[in-house]
Image (cartoon, helix red, strand yellow):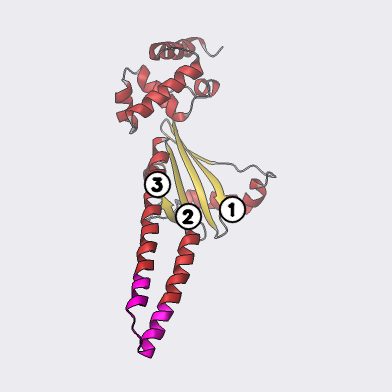
Amino acid sequence: MATVLNQQSKQIAEVFRDLSEDAASGAPVGNTLGRLLNLIHQSAEVLREEQRKIVVLAKEFDSLNLGVMTLDAKDARIIFQTLRVADWLKAYFPGEQTQALQVPKSLTSWLENQRISSTAAFGGAKQIKPFIVNKNQSVLTVRLQSVLESGECVMLLSEENETVPGDFANFFSLTPREAETLYWLEAGLSCKEVANKLGIESPTARVFLQHIREKLGVHSKNEAIQKLREIRQKGLP
């Protein structure tokens, strides 16, 4: 998008210069003005389309219980964040955001250390450690995904609810969302009710159940629940 907008900005500047020259010389400006308005309209369309894509992508991240934010680490200012990130920052860092779009204080020193080591880390020389914070029975993990040439940092956030034993979820390679789905199914909720509980669509909950059955090696929801209960009692094989 940036490349397209840069090209259009140059074209707009050129046409605007032509318009100024036409006006100064007394030449008709109708055609040049039409070109200028057309370019401005095209730029607006590009922005609207990219904004639509960002909204769709943000919803996809939310459905996976993930969040993304980009920020300017120099002044600890958030540039972009998905809705789930905004909720998590309020819940896990109460009182640390004295201003809107401010990075929580406990994240800033960690982030600076990550930025310093990011070049070596992404090259494989050093492992980047995530920032982890606990709240009740939930865990928020913050990872530095990349540092852009502009200096902006791209962060990936995820939350895990310890509703299914962590060793059980890890043993069967269940994702956090799949573990949550199994927990609520065991609690007696239907797939539709689980979807409402997790803020996702019913087909997505059914896909999670399908993945759970495949990973646990069972053929039904009831068998998956039974296997979870047996392992709770007897431990992992």
Which residue type does callout 2 highlight? Leu
Question: Relative to the observer, which residue lies in front, 18 or 146?
Answer: 18
Judge left or right: residue 235 versus residue 122.
Answer: left
Q: Magenta includes 29?
A: yes
Tag 1 residue: 115
Tag 2 residue: 71
Question: Relative to the observer, which residue lies in front, 168 or 38?
Answer: 38
State which quadrant residue 208 falls in.
top left
| Dot placed on the residue nearer the N-terminal end, 3 or 1 | 3
CA gap between label 2 and label 1 equals 12 Å
CA gap between label 3 and label 2 equals 12 Å
- Picture coordinates of residue 82, whole percent (x, y): 40, 46
- Residue at 45%, 17% in the rendered image: 213
- The answer to whether the residues at label 3 and label 2 have Cβ atoms under 8 Å apart is no
| Dot placed on the residue nearer the N-terminal end, 2 or 1 | 2
| Dot placed on the residue nearer the N-terminal end, 3 or 2 | 2
Indicate the secondary structure of the residue bearing disc 2. Answer: strand
